[in-house]
Amino acid sequence: MSAAALYNLVSASLLVGAGVSLLPVPARRLAGVLAAIVSLFTLAPAVAGLVGPPSATLTQVALLQLCGQKDLIARETIAALLLVILALMFYPLSLGFGPFDPFDIGSRPKLILVAMIPIGIALIVYRKHVLLLIGAIDLLAYALGLFDNLWSALFDPILVIVCCACLAKTAACRWIGSGSVSAASKSNANQSGT
């Protein structure tokens, strides 16, 4: 079994485990870890065949979820939003709805690597060490040959969907929270006025 095939299998099992750890069951983390282990021999090959190779970023997010570092994307809303915006431009162009194919740039990634330098510096300055480590591991996975294209190591459609869901949840919580706070303050103002 090649390293890339083994990565796909392990990554798919981590995705299954992370999904189980999100369910409302007792001992979620333990259930997620057990699901990841069992699915490695049962469900992971089917998941890997269905979704293709998950990006190194998505694999790391799943691993962090299993390790109890939940809500990473919810905490990093700016990074998640930037990824969604990038994907909204990237995927239509990659599908031929534009003058060039950005996916092709990932096969010869010098331009992407140069663009990542200021991003890395910004992550250091703003002390986003987890995001910096995720990016470094993405680059390492590409350098080790687990991915033919750097874009594939950095993000995939499932990660974009997860980011969209987390952003929607965060926005809904803020909206509901601000609505209940303003309603409570109006109620308190009405009670103190009488």
Image (tube, rainbow, N blue to C red):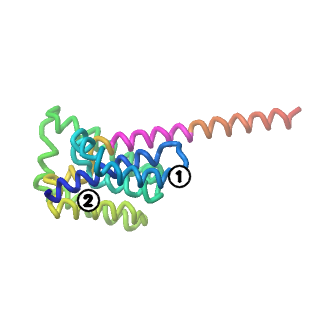
Instruction: Decide whether residue 167 is among the magenta residues.
Output: yes
Which amino acid is tagged 1? Ala
- Residue at 23% in and 51% down: 8
Q: CA distance from mark 2 to mark 1?
A: 30 Å
- Residue at 35% in and 39% down: 161
User: Of helix, strand and loop, which one carries label 1?
Assistant: loop
Q: Residues within 10 Å of mark 1 (few under 14, many from 20)?
A: few
Quadrant of the image for the N terminus? bottom left
User: Of helix, strand and loop, which one carries label 2?
Assistant: helix
| Spot occupied by residue 143 in the image (x, y as percentages of width and height) | 17, 63
| Spot occupied by residue 77 in the image (x, y as percentages of width and height) | 44, 49
Using the image as rendered, state which of residue 70 and residue 100 is in the foreground.
Answer: 70
The residue labelled by disc 2 is: 138
Using the image as rendered, state which of residue 190 and residue 133 is in the foreground.
Answer: 133
Q: Which residues are magenta?
A: 160-174
Instruction: Decide whether residue 30 is among the magenta residues.
Output: no
| Spot occupied by residue 69 in the image (x, y as percentages of width and height) | 46, 58
Q: Earlier in the sequence, mark 2 or mark 1?
A: 1
